[in-house]
């Protein structure tokens, strides 16, 4: 979990660093007016950087819009960078790694396309894939542009040609991908790069990890107090996998020592007893040190808000008390509680912890059913005292005797031979119908019916709680380790846009969004305007649009005009396509995730109505896409609603904002 804390700290720092590609500060324009509250996404606020740290980082020149000076570059090379989207295009990029930023530029250009502050990088990993389809989406930008001589960095055409030839004839050659995950402050992006060899990818991985570690260590050294640094180091050490495994091993070893001690029952004044006493002192010292490390790493609220930590603290205090006051008579009884040390292993083993939490969550409905069982037992105990207190005072002399007798009957332990048949001896023919009916009715009602109901409720609630626990664990794993690595940078905004009632409602939201981004009232929106407008929206994670993303969303600028701007018609068409793809992707994710977290969705056997509806919607959307593709191949126009009201000029925007004539570019 150390990665989660560090990730949250980097996120808080990056949220204040919103500058556009041109180097200008992006201005916040308030909350997102999409007809939705933007409070749906909760921000993490774990261990943020100080204001001094943020000021130090903001004062650096990591947001220069031009290629960095050679003196600042630690590593430079050529990589393919994958654009966002399911069919993301691989584009050749010149990559520069400086002391505080990773930046990219097009071939032969001095202007940067994108940059990533190293402080905002959460994770760097290598992935090897063998996918023929990846080789089909490579764009040779360098061969379609006139080569420009960079005044800061020059590269030969042979180097570019050699790298571009990576595409040819490599259908079955494994690709080595470098994945770079950024924090929420940088939009939660997952940047994917491709190199010619695995060795080159590993070189970039080592360089990136080393630079990120240096930047973050230097930032902590400059901004953290001595207490915060000690807490950070202790937390990283305590939450390592090796440390947790050692603690589990010590707990289990202590449990077996307790078993051996109680089995041998050696006198305390003997040599063996002295040995067991010293071993117990060693275990107590280890558990005390582990508790102190836990308290130091998670002080104050994170520690005391966990019930497992309270259990650890109570067990350690009892152990210390038993050692400090060994001569006190009642301490021997307290020493027995040391056996509960093994319960601490539940905290560290996920499967056991899930069972305990599921049992705890299912207790309330089970107790309701168990109360009915106890009530029926109490009623029969009262009847038994009234009917049989003189006949069998040993079992029914008073309520407490009778209640224990009826509970014994529920367990099935000798209820007929020891209790019921012993009362038949006073009957003339050796059988009493009244006694038989009393016990048979009780056994049928309580033993056959109510006990099985308790078990059924327990099983049902346990399964529900277990599924919920798995879901929460998956969410914690995603948020703590990788945050939300978006498949599309517009996902936070598309989440709001997708919550529309009618097609006209969606058009109104897109129209409002267009006006917010058209700062200069040109009736058009370009990349820089769209980038700065998205940065200012009140959505989380913050949207950081790159030129590669813009090019991919506009189908290589096919939706744009000659100046690569979007008018209202083109803007709405682009966002409708993005909403449609977003809905399809979310539907697919829900379907493949199953009705719980285990198993997959089967439309033939599923009883989950929501999943079945999503399956049907997915099929309908797929069928409509096929119809559109067939119409396009036949040269016929795609089905759409008239767009007469969408071609607005600057003078007619007021009328359009009232919703008059807003059209739809997608399928209704």
Image (tube, rainbow, N blue to C red):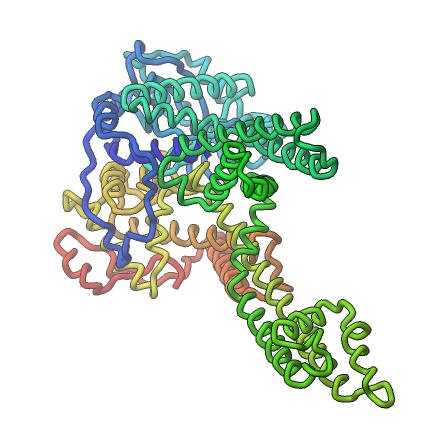
Quadrant in the picture for residue 600: bottom right
The image shows a total of numbered marks equal to 0
153 horizontally vs 461: left or right? left
Q: Nearer the viewer, residue 556 or 578?
A: 578
Above or below residue 425? Residue 113 is above
Q: State whether residue 55 appears in this view.
A: yes
Q: Which residue sits at x=68%, y=73%?
A: 406
In the rendered image, residue 196, in percent from the top left (x then y), is placed at 53, 21
Q: Nearer the viewer, residue 86 or 567?
A: 86
Above or below residue 652? Residue 256 is above
Q: Nearer the viewer, residue 420 or 53?
A: 420
Above or below residue 177? Residue 617 is below
In the rendered image, residue 549, in percent from the top left (x then y), is placed at 36, 38
Q: Nearer the viewer, residue 168 or 372?
A: 372
Quadrant in the picture for residue 660: bottom left
Q: Which residue sits at x=65%, y=26%?
A: 274
462 horizontally vs 414: left or right? left
Q: Specify the farthest residue to the right.
A: 429
102 horizontally vs 249: left or right? left
In the rendered image, residue 403, in percent from the top left (x then y), is placed at 63, 73
Q: Specify the farthest residue to the left.
A: 651
In the rendered image, residue 540, in percent from the top left (x then y), is placed at 32, 45
Above or below residue 295? Residue 401 is below
Q: State whether residue 345 appears in this view.
A: no
Q: Quadrant of the C terminus?
A: bottom left
């Amino acid at each position: 979990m150390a990665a989660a804390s560090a990730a949250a700290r980097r996120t808080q720092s990056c949220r204040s660093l919103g500058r556009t590609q041109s180097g200008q500060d992006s201005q916040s324009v308030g909350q997102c007016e999409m007809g939705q509250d933007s409070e749906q996404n909760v921000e993490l606020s774990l261990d943020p950087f100080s204001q001094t740290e943020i000021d130090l980082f903001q004062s650096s020149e990591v947001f220069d819009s031009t290629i960095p000076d050679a003196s600042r570059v630690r590593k430079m090379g050529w990589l393919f960078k994958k654009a966002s989207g399911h069919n993301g295009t691989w584009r050749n990029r010149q990559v520069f790694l400086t002391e505080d930023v990773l930046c990219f530029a097009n071939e032969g250009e001095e202007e940067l396309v994108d940059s990533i502050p190293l402080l905002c990088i959460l994770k760097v990993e290598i992935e090897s894939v063998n996918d023929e389809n990846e080789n089909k989406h490579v764009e040779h930008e360098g061969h379609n542009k006139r080569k420009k001589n960079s005044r800061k960095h020059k590269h030969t055409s042979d180097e570019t040609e050699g790298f571009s030839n990576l595409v040819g004839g490599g259908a079955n050659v494994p690709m080595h991908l470098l994945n770079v995950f950024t924090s929420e402050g940088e939009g939660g992006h997952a940047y994917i790069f491709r190199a010619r060899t695995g060795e080159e990818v590993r070189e970039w991985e080592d360089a990136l990890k080393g630079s990120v570690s240096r930047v973050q260590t230097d930032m902590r050294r400059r901004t953290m107090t001595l207490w915060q640094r000690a807490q950070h180091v202790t937390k990283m050490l305590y939450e390592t996998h090796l440390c947790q495994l050692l603690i589990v091993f010590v707990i289990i070893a202590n449990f077996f020592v307790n078993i051996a001690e109680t089995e041998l029952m050696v006198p305390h004044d003997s040599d063996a007893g002295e040995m067991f006493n010293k071993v117990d002192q060693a275990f107590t010292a280890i558990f005390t040190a582990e508790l102190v490390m836990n308290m130091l790493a998670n002080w104050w609220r994170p520690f005391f808000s966990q019930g497992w930590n309270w259990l650890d603290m109570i067990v350690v205090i009892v152990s210390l008390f038993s050692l400090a006051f060994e001569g006190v008579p009642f301490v021997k009884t307290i020493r027995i509680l040391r056996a509960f040390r093994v319960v601490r292993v539940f905290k560290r083993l996920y499967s056991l912890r899930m069972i305990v939490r599921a049992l705890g969550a299912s207790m309330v409905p089970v107790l309701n059913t168990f109360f009915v069982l106890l009530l029926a037992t109490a009623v029969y105990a009262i009847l038994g005292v009234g009917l049989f207190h003189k006949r069998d005072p040993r079992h029914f002399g008073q309520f407490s005797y009778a209640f224990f007798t009826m509970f014994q009957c529920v367990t099935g332990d000798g209820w007929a031979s020891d209790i019921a048949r012993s009362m038949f001896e006073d009957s003339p023919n050796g059988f009493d119908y009244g006694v038989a009916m009393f016990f048979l009715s009780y056994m049928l009602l309580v033993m056959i019916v109510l006990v099985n109901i308790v078990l059924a409720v327990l099983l049902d609630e346990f399964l529900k709680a277990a599924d919920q626990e798995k879901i929460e664990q998956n969410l914690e794993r995603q948020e703590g380790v990788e945050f939300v690595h978006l498949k599309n940078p517009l996902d936070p905004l598309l989440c709001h846009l997708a919550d529309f009632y009618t097609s006209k409602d969606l058009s109104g939201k897109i129209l409002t969004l267009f006006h917010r981004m058209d700062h200069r009232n040109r009736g058009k929106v370009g990349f820089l305007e769209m980038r700065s407008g998205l940065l200012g929206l009140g959505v989380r994670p913050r949207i950081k649009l790159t030129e590669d993303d813009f090019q991919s969303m506009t189908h290589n600028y096919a939706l744009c005009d000659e100046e690569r701007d979007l008018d209202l018609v083109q803007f709405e068409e682009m966002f409708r396509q993005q909403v449609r793809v977003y809905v399809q992707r979310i539907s697919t994710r829900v379907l493949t995730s199953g009705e719980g977290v285990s198993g997959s969705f089967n439309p033939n056997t599923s009883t989950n109505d929501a999943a079945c509806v999503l399956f049907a919607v997915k099929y309908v959307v797929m069928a409509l896409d096929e119809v559109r593709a067939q119409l396009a191949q036949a040269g016929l126009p795609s089905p759409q609603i008239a767009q007469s009201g969408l071609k607005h000029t600057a003078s007619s925007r007021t009328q359009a904002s009232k919703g008059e004539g807003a059209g739809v570019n997608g399928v209704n």
